[in-house]
Amino acid sequence: MCSFLEWRELKIVYKRYASLYFCCAIEQSDNELLTLEIIHRYVELLDKYFGSVCELDIIFNFEKAYFMLDELMLGGEVQETSKKNVLKAIAAQDLLQEANDRVNPAAKRSKLQIGMENNLQSKSENFTLTLRDCFDDQSS
């Protein structure tokens, strides 16, 4: 099974873990195998943090998933290779968030978070449609 597709001027690198697909669009000159390793490292981090990561973990904790990705990568390049260091940064962020929630319980769910949660489903559907278009382009 191939985990690479060419789409327009990009290469799509994807990997399936249980019911989750992780996809990256990279330039033609980028290394596909390195991208697969980065995806694998990200999934390992998610598994370590959430236990056995599933779709609901990412949907309801997307800010933590994005924060983990931000700690792992910066500007499309690997920033931190140590899982331990990334998880320490996540733990520090969790402590900061808990302290903030104790001080200001009303700020726990901001309007921005509520709006992002409402828009997450539509973004997910748009991404699925875009990915479906990518597969349709390959078959023709």
Image (spheres, rainbow, N blue to C red):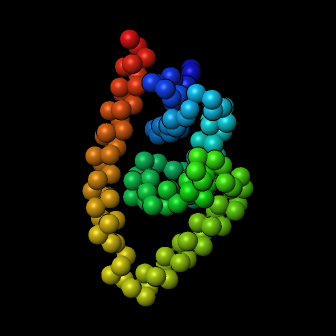
Left or right position of 136 against 88: left
Return the residue nearer the eye: 134 or 82: 134
Examine the image and state in which quarter residue 79 appears. Answer: bottom right
**Total tally of numbered discs in the picture:** 0
Q: Quadrant of the C terminus?
A: top left
Residue 18 in sight here: no
Query: Residue lying farthest top?
Result: 140
Residue found 70% across the figure and 60% down from its top: 84
Residue found 32% across the figure and 32% down from its top: 129
Left or right position of 54 against 88: left
Query: Residue lying farthest bottom?
Result: 103
Residue 6 at what x, y percent from top left?
A: 50, 22
Return the residue nearer the eye: 57 or 134: 134
On screen, residue 112 above or below 1: below
Residue 28 at what x, y percent from top left?
A: 58, 27
On screen, residue 8 above or below 124: above
Residue 60 at what x, y percent from top left?
A: 39, 58
Residue found 51% across the figure and 35% down from its top: 25
Q: Quadrant of the N terminus?
A: top right
Residue 125 in sight here: yes
Return the residue nearer the eye: 61 or 6: 6
On screen, residue 131 above or below 126: above
Residue 74 at what x, y percent from top left?
A: 60, 53
